[in-house]
Amino acid sequence: MLSTAYLPPVSWMQAALKADNVIIEACETYPRQTYRNRCRIITANGVLPLSIPVTKPGGGKTKTKDIEIFYDDPWQRAHWLSIDIAYSNSPFYLYYKDELEKFYRKKFRFLLDYNMEVLNTIFSLLGETTEISLTEDFIHSPEGILDLRETISPKKADPEGHYKPYHQVFEEKHGFVEDLSIIDLLFNEGPGAGSVLNRE
């Protein structure tokens, strides 16, 4: 069981690919400052967090499935511009660019719907078929399920404690930066991204 995530980090994707079935939490009270609406990419100046602005129609008790995307700020243009500047020189940027750029032109009402559409595209680009479902109720401590909803977080280190290095555009300047968004791996490793994710 995982939280929803915007352009998920490598650790999220590794966990998802190890599972036969992935359950995305939809019914929790939406928490702040998580990967649910943010990701991390690397630029010439270092790590850059990208955050989708959201609104809570039900106030502080709004469920994740009801969180709406806020469009008064032109975040889509800003995010794609940052991604383009960061990865335009990466080996596989042109190969995947069109499949991802479309999500910065189309508007979705709900964050969960947006994240799921992006996630399905990422799985397709990786050549992976993982069964994904959404929760219908909130269960605090589900039995018989590996619960990683709060484990994979920008505030915590990878629970596995390690990452498999791969080529990164700004590696000479910043060294290898761990657990960036899956797009960092895709743009840099292309069809080899799956083997990086599945390394033990």
Image (cartoon, rainbow, N blue to C red):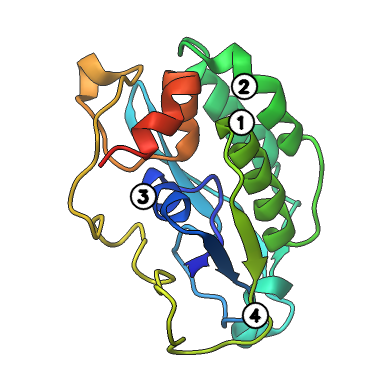
The residue carrying pointer 4 sits among few (fewer than 14), some (14 to 19) or many (20 or more) residues within 10 Å by Cα, namely some
Q: Residue at x 25, y 42 (%)?
A: 200
Q: Which residue is mark 4?
A: 63
Q: Which residue is mark 1?
A: 125
- Determine whether the residue tagged by mark 1 lies in a helix, strand or loop: helix
**Front label number (3 vs 4):** 3
- The alpha-carbon separation of the residues under discs 3 and 4 comes to 24 Å
Q: Residue at x 57, y 68 (%)?
A: 23
Nearest to N terminus: mark 2 or mark 4:
4
Mark identifier at residue 172? none
Q: Which residue is mark 3?
A: 11
Nearest to N terminus: mark 1 or mark 2:
2
Q: Which residue is mark 2?
A: 96
Q: Which of the two residues, 56 or 167, is positioned nearer the viewer here? A: 167
Tally of numbered discs: 4
**Front label number (4 vs 1):** 1
Quadrant hosting residue 93: top right
Q: Is residue 143 above or below residue 52?
A: below
